[in-house]
Image (cartoon, grey):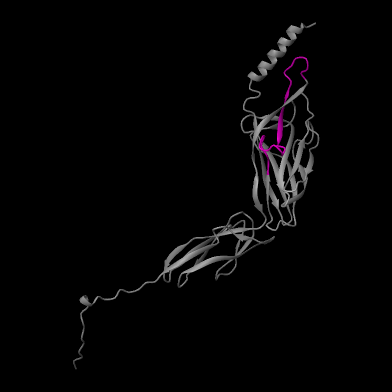
Amino acid sequence: MKSPVIGRGLILVGIVLFYATGAFAQTSFKLRLVPKVIACDSAIVSVEIQAPDSAFVMGNANLRIFYKSAQLANPSIKSRNNFSSGDYFSITSLTDVGVDTSVFTLNILYRGEQGSGTTVGNSWISVADVKFALTGTNTSKCYDLFFLPKGASSSLPNTVITRAYASPTVEDPTRTLTSEINGTFTNITNQCSLPVVAIAKDTTINAGGVAVLTLSSQNGVFPATVTITGQAPIQLTQAEPVKTVSVSPASETIYQILTVTGNCGSGSAAAGKSQAKVSVLQVTLPECPPTKCIPLTLRIIK
């Protein structure tokens, strides 16, 4: 029979060794939201996680995704990509609809033993894909999604992620412990299904010269059909997100983006980048100064 003192001593040694081996050293996570599909009436995003410094086994987690109630609605899990079988119960979800801000929570439920489970390492791995509906009042067809770091709000819940590890105790070596870890987040801001295009740049040419104007997508939404002053429609695509137009005005002309159209409706010109001015220098011959001009008389001799 083991002495209680010896048993406690072994437990203490085990815990000290556990800490000394760096089991808790610099453990953290990065969590990001990645746009996958944005259609005219819906958006699909991927929730992905990474361990930038020290790999860890995923434990229980509550991933709380906040969205604006005026932009998005009816979130649902499109696919469960990890942490949903084996050492984990199937990922569950919960929606809490608010007047201004709503939250959709992905719950990862751990059931492994001896610290077994899926390891989060240096490579990004997907937790799940989530689908949102664009609301009928969202005429801009843009949306924002974000996580709240710990302590960011006293009234809204933050995202919680734990790591799982085997208990260092001698009495119960099969037991799994979990501890909360800190992390950083990458959110989605102003992701749109309507194109935004810019025109550049102001330039000066000589009379009869040619100016080159550049049209470019500002948000990566294609196709985008653009019309500018005095020109035929121009289409920007994924393969050609930037196009140039050559113009040769006779006098100063401002070329303005008149319309931008995408598959989901009318887009817009980028703020502060909706027009380009082409100035024209008129070339004039210098007049002959009177003091330096010599009259010339011609006489025809037969």
On the rendered structure, is 11 left or right of 122?
A: right
Counting every numbered tag in the picture gives 0
Q: Please say if 298 is above or below 210.
A: below
Quadrant in the rendering for residue 221: bottom right
Q: Residue furthest left?
A: 301
**Nearest to the observer: residue 295 or residue 82:** 295
Q: Please say if 4 is above or below 117.
A: above
Quadrant in the rendering for residue 301: bottom left
Residue 111, image x, y percentages: 79, 29
**Nearest to the observer: residue 15 or residue 115:** 15
In the rendered image, residue 168 lying in the magenta stretch gets the answer: yes
Residue 62, image x, y percentages: 74, 36
Residue 147, image x, y percentages: 68, 41
Identified at 24% across, 75% down, the residue is 289
Quadrant in the rendering for residue 231: bottom right
Q: Please say if 294 is above or below 239.
A: below
**Nearest to the observer: residue 222 or residue 75:** 75
**Nearest to the observer: residue 137 or residue 200:** 137
Identified at 70% across, 13% down, the residue is 12
Magenta residues, start to end: 146-173
Image quadrant in which the N terminus is located: top right
Residue 143, image x, y percentages: 68, 51
Image quadrant in which the C terminus is located: bottom left
Q: Residue furthest bottom?
A: 302
Q: Residue furthest front?
A: 154
On the rendered structure, is 288 left or right of 142?
A: left
Q: Main secondary structure of the magenta part?
A: loop
Identified at 37% across, 72% down, the residue is 283
In the rendered image, residue 294 lying in the magenta stretch gets the answer: no
